[in-house]
Structure formats: C-alpha cells, structure tokens
C-alpha cells in the first residue's frame, strides 16, 4: 500500500518524489513497452476506442451491436449483391423469402428505433437478378464475323431451343 501524502506537502511535489525514488530503485527498467511509441498517439480521439479494441480482439463485427431495424434496412439495401452469385431463380426467391420472414417478424414485434421497412417484392429482385446475369454473359458474336441481317437471323435461329427428334416424329402423325 502506498504511503499517505504528508499534510504540508503539495500533491505535485509528493508524486514527483515518488516517481524519482521508483526510478532510482529501477522499477521502471525492462517494462514491456519500453522504447516503443505509445499506441494511438497522434490520432484523433475516439471515445469508443475500448469498444473497437474489444471487438477487434474478439473477432466480432460491429453489426452485432446494431438494432434489428437497421440490420434489416442494411440487408434490404444489399439484397441485390447477396443474390448476385445465385445460380437459379429458386435460390434467389429463397433468399428473398428468408429476408421477408425476418421483416415480418420485426413488424409484428418492433424493437429499437422505428425505421420504415416493408417486405421485398420477390418478382422485382428476380427481374433485377436476370438483368444482371444477362449483362454478365458475353453476347454471341455474329456468324462468320459479319453483322448482316441474314447472320443475325441465323444467330437468332440457332439460339432457339431445338425440339427432340421423337417430338417432331410424333407431331408429324407418322407415329
């Protein structure tokens, strides 16, 4: 336990005396941060520094601290990015359905700040997903490297799905 300050001595001189005596005894030698710069020196003061450090040490994102309404709003804004890698329309609709389920649950029992949120229209998201997929796919080059009306027509003809041989045979009435 530290000794008490003598009544006639000032705090500044008493503290300076204790630091000087501790330095003379060698209590400040071989400290873990000796010779290293002070972390965060020269940066702007952040009053939530301890929270950011804790989240970084624990490996947790700050999203866990957001209220549900803001998380839902963010998920709605990032929905097109979330479904971008989906391969089928069914996957896109499942993602939208899961988000809509969370939105409806929040609307039934809202907590946190009220943010106007409504369920997402799955058909609009599927349409956006289809447009994004079409722009990613490279367009077919014209046949023979020419861009003539006949080349475009033949390219459109080859793009149509072909009927199976047995369907053609069945439709012709010979079967």
Image (cartoon, rainbow, N blue to C red):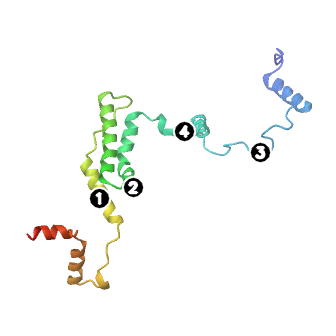
What residue is shown with label 3? Answer: 36
Question: From the viewer's perspective, is the residue at label 4 or at label 1 nearer?
Answer: 1
Q: Which residue is mark 1?
A: 130
Neighbor class of circle 1 (other Cα within 10 Å; few <14, some 14-19, many 20+) is some
1 vs 3, front mark? 1
Q: Quadrant of the N terminus?
A: top right
| Whether residue 142 is situated above or below residue 39 in the rendered picture | below
Tell me where residue 49 appears, x and y as whole percent: 60, 37
The residue sitting at the top extreme is: 7
Alpha-carbon distance for marks 2 and 3? 46 Å
In the rendered image, which quarter contains the C terminus?
bottom left
Task: Measure the alpha-carbon separation of dots 1 and 3.
Answer: 56 Å
Look at the numbered disc 1 and give the secondary structure of its residue.
Answer: helix
Residue 85 is marked as 2
Q: Disc 2 to disc 1, how far (Cα)?
A: 11 Å
Mark 2 or 1, nearer chain start:
2
> Residue at the location (30% across, 42% down)?
97
What residue sits right under mark 4 in the picture? Answer: 60
> Measured from the top left, where is residue 119 in percent x and y?
28, 40
CA gap between label 3 and label 4 equals 28 Å
Q: Quadrant of residue 26?
A: top right
């Amino acid at each position: 336990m530290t000794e008490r300050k003598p009544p006639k001595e000032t705090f500044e001189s008493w503290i300076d005396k204790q630091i000087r005596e501790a330095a003379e005894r060698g209590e400040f030698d071989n400290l873990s941060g000796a010779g290293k710069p002070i972390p965060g020196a020269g940066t702007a003061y952040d009053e939530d520094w301890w929270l950011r450090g804790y989240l970084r040490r624990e490996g947790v994102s700050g999203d866990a601290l957001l209220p549900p309404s803001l998380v839902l709003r963010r998920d709605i804004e990032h929905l097109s990015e979330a479904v971008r890698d989906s391969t089928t329309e069914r996957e896109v609709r499942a993602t939208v359905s899961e988000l809509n389920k969370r939105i409806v649950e929040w609307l039934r029992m809202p907590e946190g700040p009220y943010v106007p949120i409504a369920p997402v229209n799955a058909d609009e998201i599927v349409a956006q997903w289809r447009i994004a997929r079409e722009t990613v796919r490279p367009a077919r080059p014209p046949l023979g490297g020419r861009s003539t009306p006949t080349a475009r027509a033949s390219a459109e003809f080859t793009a149509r799905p072909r009927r199976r041989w047995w369907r053609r045979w069945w439709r012709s009435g010979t079967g």
